[in-house]
Image (cartoon, helix red, strand yellow):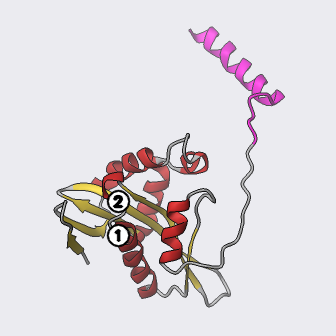
Amino acid sequence: MKTTTKSKKHSRVTIREMALRDLSDVYELGAQLFTAEKWPTLYRAWDEHEILNLFNSESEYCLVAECDEVIVGFALGTMMRKPRNSWSYGWLLWLGVSPRFKRRGLGGRLINKLTDTFIDDGARMMLVDTDAQNKTALGLFRKMGFADEMNHVYLSKNLHAHPRYIERTLDEEEWEDEIG
């Protein structure tokens, strides 16, 4: 099912299920939004395989917003069903809106459409997470009724100084010297 609206400054924006032809455009928009400088954790997790895996396994939870045949937003989710548990959880994994279309209700429309799909498929709860510093996303999620915030800490470790990493790098350089 498509949903459309027309804003004063833009043509109609249609929300629909993502199609195969949309994968590269969704990836490119996400790469513009989830930069290493602004959102390092999101940047590390955003890649072509993530989108392709979601599309191949649960395409009904992959939505795009399109205006004049250009992808201007997306919502990618998954349904979690646990064995021996009567509850199913819809999880909004990725939400992105082109900067030109922010503050026009598009993120909320994407969330609403995905929420409807989750409910239709039996979800009893919907989850979302974001960077603690992403005030815009937190404001939108709260406005959309998400609550019960919990803190989660992500840690990282740079391996370039680890002895095994150094050994592997040296082995690769020696191998390249031998064949090169």
Q: Residue 106: horizontal and vertical position, in percent?
A: 34, 67
Which disc number belongs to residue 73?
2
Quadrant in which residue 104 is drawn:
bottom left
Residue 177: in magenta span: yes
Between residues 180 and 68, which one lies in front from this camera angle? 68
Q: CA distance from mark 2 to mark 1?
A: 11 Å
Considering the numbered disc 2 on the image, is that residue within a helix, a strand or a loop?
strand
Q: Residue at x 48, y 50 (%)?
A: 49
Considering the numbered disc 1 on the image, is that residue within a helix, a strand or a loop?
loop
Between residues 178 and 167, which one lies in front from this camera angle? 167
Asked if 173 appears above or below 10 in the picture, the reply is above
Count of numbered badges drawn on the protein: 2
Left or right of 124: which side holds 111?
left
| Label 1 Cα neighbours within 10 Å, binned few <14 / some 14-19 / many ≥20 | few
Q: Earlier in the sequence, mark 2 or mark 1?
A: 2
Q: Residue at x 63, y 9 (%)?
A: 177
Q: Residue 75: horizontal and vertical position, in percent?
A: 41, 65
Asked if 150 appears above or below 178 in the picture, the reply is below
Residue interval drawn in magenta: 157-180
Dominant secondary structure of the magenta stretch?
A: helix
Eye-nearest disc, 2 or 1:
1
Q: Amino acid at mark 2?
A: Gly
Q: Residue at x 44, y 85 (%)?
A: 121
Where, quadrant-wise, is the N terminus in this rendering? Answer: bottom left
User: Could one spot residue 78 in this view of the protein?
Assistant: no
Q: Can you identify the residue that label 1 sits on?
A: 105
Q: Residue at x 50, y 43 (%)?
A: 35
Residue extending farthest bottom? 86
Left or right of 154: which side holds 17?
left
User: Could one spot residue 86 in this view of the protein?
Assistant: yes
Where, quadrant-wise, is the C terminus in this rendering? Answer: top right
Between residues 84 and 120, which one lies in front from this camera angle? 120
